[in-house]
Image (tube, coloured by chain):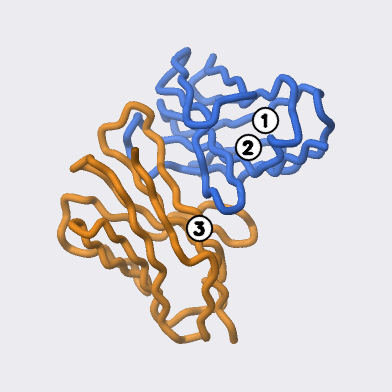
Amino acid sequence: AQTVTQSQPEMSVQEAETVTLSCTYDTSENNYYLFWYKQPPSRQMILVIRQEAYKQQNATENRFSVNFQKAAKSFSLKISDSQLGDTAMYFCALGRIYNQGGKLIFGQGTELSVKP
Amino acid sequence: EAQVTQNPRYLITVTGKKLTVTCSQNMNHEYMSWYRQDPGLGLRQIYYSMNVEVTDKGDVPEGYKVSRKEKRNFPLILESPSPNQTSLYFCASSLRQGDQPQHFGDGTRLSIL
């Protein structure tokens, strides 16, 4: 069975500081994607960053970067220069490339508060 | 604008009163899916569809039905809603099964009293 675990239900960070959100996963597949989604109070699911498992290089998107450790099955999200607009629920998700159901497996979520 | 549209955004109803949440996408996507989001559980897949007239169960299908008569539409039907179906629901689509990322609708908050 595939699982995704986010062990930090809540985190807070001061504006302009850096914060890292943790995610571990379990899968027997070799080809998969990993994602971080942001869910602000508006409830939209916004894709923040994605990583293909076959790529060794860590993905980056502006202030967001990941630390992908395939052997350890770890996929953490680093937010640099945190802004008030980063306040949201963050979900880590796993998607198989060749998948019977095409589904994403989500973690429990981490509620991030950025404080002024 | 490419989008996945869900309606209604909010609904409060009572136990046993049939309801339908609509989902429509304008991207000619073959694959569509429904998720429910509950605190501490993240999002879990309810049903999915790989194309017109092809649907299958996800991880939590009990109490739900779906249909896929047209490519763009994938309604979620609660024939006899119960309080344990109170949740936040998301529809998602992608060009084909397994394509990532999936495009999400804005969510539907259902409260079953």
Q: Name the residue under label 2.
A: B6
Label 2–label 3 contact, CB within 8 A: no
Q: Could you say which chain is coloured orange in the image?
A: A
Chain identity of mark 1: B
Q: How many labels does the image show?
A: 3
The tag earlier along the polypeptide, 2 or 1, is 2
Chain name for mark 3: A
- In the picture shown, does residue A26 fall above or below A1? below
Q: In this view, does A25 lie to the left or right of A43?
A: left
Name the residue carrying label 3: A109
Image depth: mark 2 or mark 3 in front: 3
Rounded to the nearest whole Å, what is the CA distance between mark 2 and mark 3?
Answer: 23 Å
Instruction: Determine which of the numbered discs, if any, sits on residue B58 in the image.
Output: none
List x then y, in percent, for residue B78.
69, 24
The image quarter containing residue A71 is bottom left
**Quick one: which chain is blue?**
B
Label 1, on which residue?
Answer: B21
The image quarter containing residue A115 is bottom right
> How far is the residue under mark 1 from the one under mark 3?
25 Å
Q: Which of marks 1 and 3 is in front?
A: 3
Q: Residue at x 30, y 66 (%)?
A: A66
